[in-house]
Image: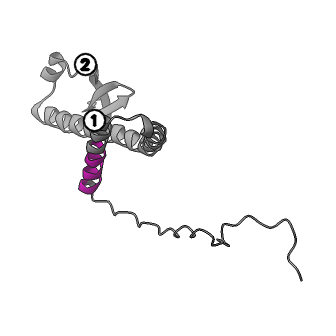
Amino acid sequence: MLIREQGRSIKLLRAERSKDTRRHRHVVIGAFRVDEGVPAELLEQLNQAERRELAQWLAVWRESQAMGRTHAVLANASSALDQLVATLEVATGFLTPAEADALWHKLQAITRGLQRGGGPRPNQTTQRPPPHLGELDLFDAPPSPFPHPR
C-alpha cells in the first residue's frame, strides 16, 4: 500500500497487477483528512496488514508533527526570553513582594527544565571589578582628544 500526503489530505493507494499488461497500477482505495481521522468505511476496505501499516504511518506522522511544533517553539524561545528580561528590567521597581516571589518560583521552574534537558551550563564570564574611587580605569577611559606624544 502506498500512502500519499498532500497538505492535510491523505490518499491510500493499492498496487494491483493488471492481467492484460502484467504491470502494476495504483488504485485509489480512499482519501481522508488528517484532522477528521480515518473513516470507518475506508478501514473496512483495508486488509489487516494495510490497517497495521496505516496505524504505524499515522503514529510516525503525528510524532513528526509534534516535533515540528516543538522546533517552532524552541526557535522562538530565545527571543521570548530576551523580551522577558527586558520586561523584568523595566518592572523591577514596581513589583510587590508577592509578585517577585511568584517570578522567582517561575524562574526556578525554568532552571529545573534546563537541567532536565541535560544541556551544558554556559561558562560564567568573569568581569573586572569596578575601579576604586580615585583610581583610573585605563581600559574603559574615553580616548583623549589630544594625540599621543611621539
Q: Could you say where residue 11 lies in the image, as x and y percent from the top left?
A: 31, 26
Magenta part of the chain: 106-116
In the rendered image, the residue lying farthest to the front is 134
Is disc 2 surrounded by few (<14), some (14 to 19) or many (20+) residues within 10 Å? Answer: few
In the figure, is residue 37 to the left or right of 146?
left
Residue 18 in which image quadrant: top left
Q: Could you say where residue 33 lies in the image, as x and y percent from the top left?
A: 30, 21
Q: Residue 142 has which mark?
A: none
Q: Which residue is mark 1?
A: 98
In the rendered image, the residue lying farthest to the bottom is 150
Q: Quadrant of the N terminus?
A: top left
Q: Residue at x 49, y 41 (%)?
A: 86
Mark 1 vs mark 2: give the one in front: 1
For the residues labelled 1 and 2, the Cα–Cα distance comes to 46 Å
Q: Secondary structure at mark 1?
A: helix
Judged by its main secondary structure, the magenta piece is: helix
Q: Report the amino acid beneath label 1.
A: Ala
Q: Residue at x 29, y 53 (%)?
A: 114
Residue contact between numbered discs 1 and 2, judged by CB atoms under 8 Å: no
In the figure, is residue 137 to the left or right of 13?
right
Q: Residue at x 39, y 27 (%)?
A: 7
Q: Which residue is mark 2?
A: 36
User: Can residue 41 be seen at all in this image of the molecule?
Assistant: yes
Q: Quadrant of the C terminus?
A: bottom right
Q: Which one is in front, 13 or 88?
A: 88
Q: Report the amino acid beneath label 2.
A: Glu
Q: Earlier in the sequence, mark 1 or mark 2?
A: 2
Q: Residue at x 59, y 68 (%)?
A: 133
Q: Is residue 14 magenta?
A: no
Q: Secondary structure at mark 2?
A: loop
Vertical placement of residue 70 versus 30, above or below: below
Residue 70 in which image quadrant: top left
